[in-house]
Amino acid sequence: MPRVSPDHLQARRRQILDGARTCFARHGYEGATVRRLEEATGLSRGAIFHHFKDKESLFLALAEDDAARMADVVAEQGLVQVMRDLLSDRTPGGGSESETEWLGTRLEVSRRLRTDSEFRARWAQRSEQLTAATKARLQWQREGGNLRDDVDVDVLTAYLELVLEGLVSHLAMGLPADDLGPVLDVVEESVRRHRGR
């Protein structure tokens, strides 16, 4: 049997994740049957589950991939930029999937966190990446004198994460988002240090 190159394995893994994202966004976690995953990825169940132990592992890998891309954006530009990307129909981190597909995955994560204690326990091990990136970015801004210093960084982190969840919820409900840019301006301004006061 010929050896498969690491590049080929990585490309196959990416193909599975991209197809699964579409499938989970369209059908939800429960509705993303193995048959639908096969159709969305263009691969057999054997090929899919060669790379991922089961459907939950595939979903977690997909959510982790999204969280890692978001953390990269946060490290470079802050959490508000992730929100701006959502409003401009760009996927956080500039991935190839549509904002709707990313949002669908994010909503499934939120739903499963609320309803599935086993998933919540597994996700807790992975969810710190975005929080850590946000805290590090805010701390860096504070050290540069650009972040307000009358509120603890942990509180500002929780505030920004809450705004993100609210935005995701707003978009999920299909509410108008064209006028939310100025709202994010206010959010961004609310964490900045104002000199001369």
Image (cartoon, grey):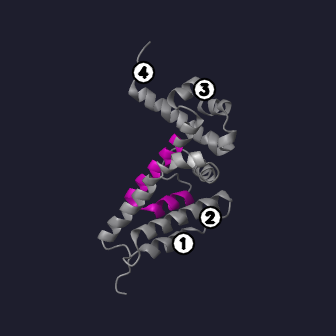
| Residue ID for mark 2 | 177
Q: First in sequence, mark 1 or 3: give its number.
A: 3
Is residue 193 in view?
A: yes
The x, y position of residue 138, in whole percent, is 38, 66
The residue sitting at 33% across, 70% down in the picture is 142
At label 1, the amino acid type is Pro
| Residue ID for mark 3 | 45
At label 2, the amino acid type is Ala
Q: Does residue 141 appear to the left or right of 29 in the view shown?
A: left
Q: Front-most of 151 and 164? A: 151
The residue sitting at 68% across, 59% down in the picture is 173
Q: Does residue 71 appear to the left or right of 123 in the view shown?
A: left
Q: First in sequence, mark 1 or 2: give its number.
A: 2
Looking at the rendering, the stretch of residues picked out in magenta corresponds to: 61-88
| Residue ID for mark 1 | 182
The x, y position of residue 98, in whole percent, is 57, 48
| Residue ID for mark 4 | 4
Q: Which secondary structure dominates the residues rendered in magenta?
A: helix
Q: Nearer the viewer, mark 4 or mark 2?
A: 4
Q: CA distance from mark 4 to mark 3?
A: 19 Å
Tags 4 and 2 in contact by the CB under 8 Å rule?
A: no
Quarter of the figure with residue 177: bottom right
